[in-house]
Image: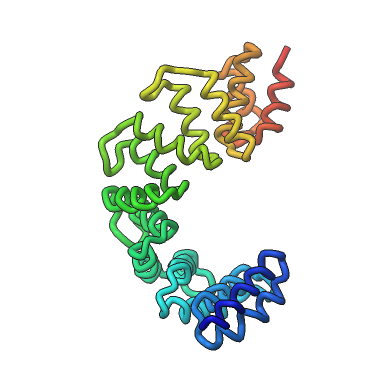
Amino acid sequence: MRQMQMTFKRGLEAFDKGDYEIALKFWMPIAEEGYPEAQYNVGLMYCNGEGVPQDYNIAYEWFILAAEQENVKARYNLGLMYDKGHGISQNYQSSIEWYTIAAEQGNSDAQNNLGRIYCEGRGVAQDYETAFEWFNAAAQKGNCDSQTNLGIFYYRGHGVQQDYKTAREWFTLAAEQEVAQAQHNLGVIYKHGKGVPKDYKIAHEWFMLAAEQGHSAAQYELGLNYAIRKGILRGYIYQYSIKIGLRLVSLPLKLLGAILKKLTP
């Protein structure tokens, strides 16, 4: 076992350097001997096409072997493969089964994905309360996607009593981890004064952070702010966008800026 651990470590060192073929040479023999962490990593390489041609079928086989030895990441990835239909037929029931096994082992990504499944009602009846429980479990572990989702639940009152203050707290935790959606949502909270005094300066700062990551709704908010500062009426912008056949809300910031430049006296 100690020799396998040393071999696995050498494979990790090679992988971290980008030497995928060398990493595979270290991992494949011990994976074939039944070392679960190596089985998972070999599966992941085939799943992502790192050092080998991408092959979901081979990845699935390695994930199954690792999952049978209680490797939680392999179990999560099996759930993901069934969820997305990668290399196998999409099957939400099988996805839920593998996610649940991994989630009960404490995997926050599996917990978050279960929350999304129950929120959207994919393969199960829509259940906000169950979704909230899974999002909360993952958020408590620091999962930034679940922190964002939990903030949305508190903001909208899904599965829990509406609470803008708590929503803001969860959004802030996720935003500090550079989640663009959470940054945008904080901008909305400060713009409209949801649980806080209206503060357009703070709203602008959060919109800017989200927009810099390509968040289209935040880019729109910045474009709208620019238009207002230039004295351009919102209705005139929409009228112009309709005239040229564009939906302004979906425009990238650069294109929006070009339109606004035309409109500016």
Q: Is residue 159 above or below residue 169?
A: below
* Residue 8 image position (x, y, % from top left): 59, 76
Residue occupying the point 70% across, 18% down: 263
Q: Which residue lies furthest to the front in this view?
A: 2
* Residue 79 image position (x, y, % from top left): 43, 67
| Side of 91 where 41 appears, left or right | right
Q: Nearer the viewer, residue 10 or 48?
A: 10
Q: In this view, does 220 lie above or below 91?
A: above
Quadrant of the image occupied by residue 125: bottom left
| Side of 144 where 162 appears, left or right | left
Total marks placed:
0
Can residue 57 be seen here?
A: no
* Residue 76 image position (x, y, % from top left): 44, 66
Display colour scheme: rainbow
Residue occupying the point 71% across, 76% down: 21
Can residue 171 be seen here?
A: yes
Q: In this view, does 153 lie above or below 56?
A: above
Residue occupying the point 36% across, 65% down: 105
| Side of 14 where 169 appears, left or right | left
Quadrant of the image occupied by residue 7: bottom right
Residue occupying the point 60% across, 29% down: 208
- In the picture, the quarter occupied by the C terminus is top right
Q: Residue furthest bottom?
A: 33
Q: Nearer the viewer, residue 203 or 229?
A: 203
Q: In this view, does 116 lie above or below 30?
A: above
